[in-house]
Image (cartoon, grey):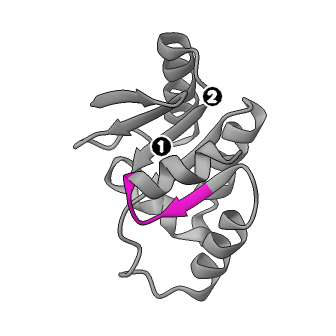
Amino acid sequence: MKNKIINDIVVVKSEDVVIRDVQSAIDFIMTIKYETNCNKIALNKEAVVEDFFILSKGLAGEILQKFINYQTKFAIYGDYSKYTSKPLKDFIYESNNGKDVFFVENESEAIDKLSKC
């Protein structure tokens, strides 16, 4: 896992899945906050378990609620083109129009979104 800090935003790139469930999400948030004192995180999509993107499993809502509870802005960057689920597309659209969680295509877009909140 590689971390870099840009404008008080921690950009994380990991080859391994770091967010698998609610507890691993909490551990991730707290580790980043402890190590960097930052509350804005960008993470590559490959570091998030695939079940997160199947909304019927409820994992996305539970995990994202933890980011909100811990007052951490969060952007997941990567390619979402393979997903055809209308509920997921609607969820991404609504999130991107909010101010806490963003789903974007690349690291620079994640930094841009997080810089504005």
Q: State the extent of the magenta-drawn residues as a range.
A: 102-107
Q: Position of residue 77 (x, y in %)?
A: 42, 57
Which image quarter: residue 106? bottom left
Assess whether residue 93 is covered by the magenta stretch.
Answer: no
How far is mark 1 from mark 2, CA to CA? 10 Å
Location of the N terminus by quadrant is top left
Q: Can you say whether 20 is above or below 24 in the image?
A: below
Q: Is residue 53 left or right of residue 96?
A: left
Location of the C terminus by quadrant is top right
Q: Position of residue 93 (x, y in %)?
A: 65, 75
Mark 1 neighbour density, 10 Å: few (under 14) some (14–19) many (20 or more): many
Query: Count the marks: how many?
Result: 2
The residue that mark 2 highlights is 39
- Give whichever of 69, 110 is nearer the camera: 110
SS at badge 1 = strand
Q: Position of residue 52 (x, y in %)?
A: 50, 59
The amino acid type of the residue labelled 2 equals: Asn
SS at badge 2 = loop
- Give whichever of 57, 48 is nearer the camera: 48
Q: Which mark is residue 42?
A: 1
Seen at 67% across and 39% down, the residue is 67
